[in-house]
Amino acid sequence: MPILVTGGAGYIGSHMVHALADAGESVVVLDNLSTGFPWALPAGVPLVIGDTGDQAGVAALLATHKIESIIHFAASIVVPDSVADPLGYYRNNTANSRTLIETAIGSGVKHFIFSSTAAVYGNPAKMPVAEDDPLAPMSPYGSSKLMTEIMLRDAAAAHGLGHVVLRYFNVAGADPQQRTGQSTKGATHLIKVAVEAALGKRDRLDVFGTDYPTPDGTCVRDYIHVSDLTQAHLDALRYLRGGGASATMNCGYGRGFSVLDVIDTVKRVSGTDFQVDLGPPRPGDPAQIVASSDRARALIGWKPQHDDLSTIVTHALGWERKLMLRNR
């Protein structure tokens, strides 16, 4: 049955659409193209340009394509931007998601997979962090996602919408077949910025904070390959279709790398040195966050295939080189 992917022309969304198409699924994409690209989609996949907050438009789309399942990626995702523009984030991430959930329930959608974030945990007291640990977001971005989790949980309990919430840790890398990757100009993801610096697309890389309580003083994150993340969605969809109960799961590998670890890996893999400037911390950044992914592995049978930082960087670097040729 057809699947709607919101934000499907964006970074993670386009990987999801390729994975669904590879699996023989029928897919429709809804994207406002604010950070997405039609060329990132497989040939033949319908693209509807619009917003998740357009209730009438989304209802018509769901009816026309007889959508059974929704995978919801569409969101604003930059933590510092959310601190500067909290109301914009609550509108796009929370209010629009509320509209989408209501429309899905009214249209008879059976399954809903929500793209959440490790930012809901804030600065956890212990590592690795598990799904039932305290939730204390440090930014409007994290709060906007947590609010949506709560709305989805309560609406689903009232109306029977089967759902899975996937809390992403730091997504990176690119499609191993190099069909799509992180293509947004001015992206803030560390590995994306570092490979741009390695290829001369940026004149330097800024490190935000060097006195965190971590081994080298820089933030530590759990980096997950985007293809392993999309596999988690495929596994979650299969789980829901098989009658699985609604659940929340972390998507990460369970080990972290510091900012300086990542920079060293990019320099080694690329064979290039580049300027690194050390600066003060940014608001909203926790010192360290690493996932416990035992639940996803046990409940939906998730088995990551790309758990290696050098592999992630290699794929990101390959995509960035391809993007440079495309943009000439």
Image (cartoon, rainbow, N blue to C red):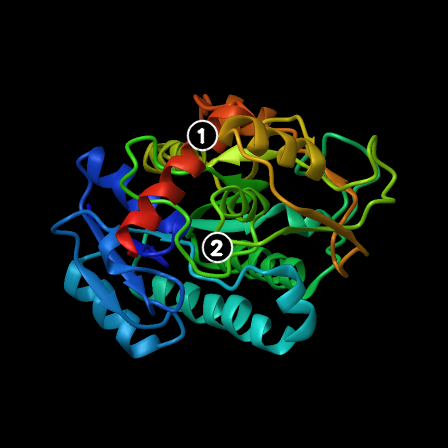
Question: Crowding near pointer 1: few (<14 within 10 Å), some, many (20+)?
Answer: some
Judge whether 33 appears above or below 68 on screen. below
User: At which x and y percent is residue 149?
Assistant: 57, 55
Instruction: Name the residue that disc number 1 marks.
Output: 314
Question: Crowding near pointer 2: few (<14 within 10 Å), some, many (20+)?
Answer: some
State the image quarter where residue 51 is shown. bottom left
User: At which x and y percent is residue 298?
Assistant: 52, 22
Label 1 sits on what residue type? Thr
For marks 1 and 2, give the one nearer the viewer: 1
Q: Is residue 144 left or right of residue 126?
A: left
Instruction: Choose between 82 and 301: the one closer to the eye.
Output: 82
User: At which x and y percent is residue 133?
Assistant: 74, 39
Q: Secondary structure at mark 1?
A: helix
Instruction: Name the residue that disc number 2 marks.
Output: 156
Q: Quadrant of the C terminus?
A: bottom left
How far apart, in angstroms, are the residues tagged by discs 1 and 2?
A: 40 Å
Judge whether 215 appears above or below 144 on screen. above
Q: Secondary structure at mark 2?
A: helix
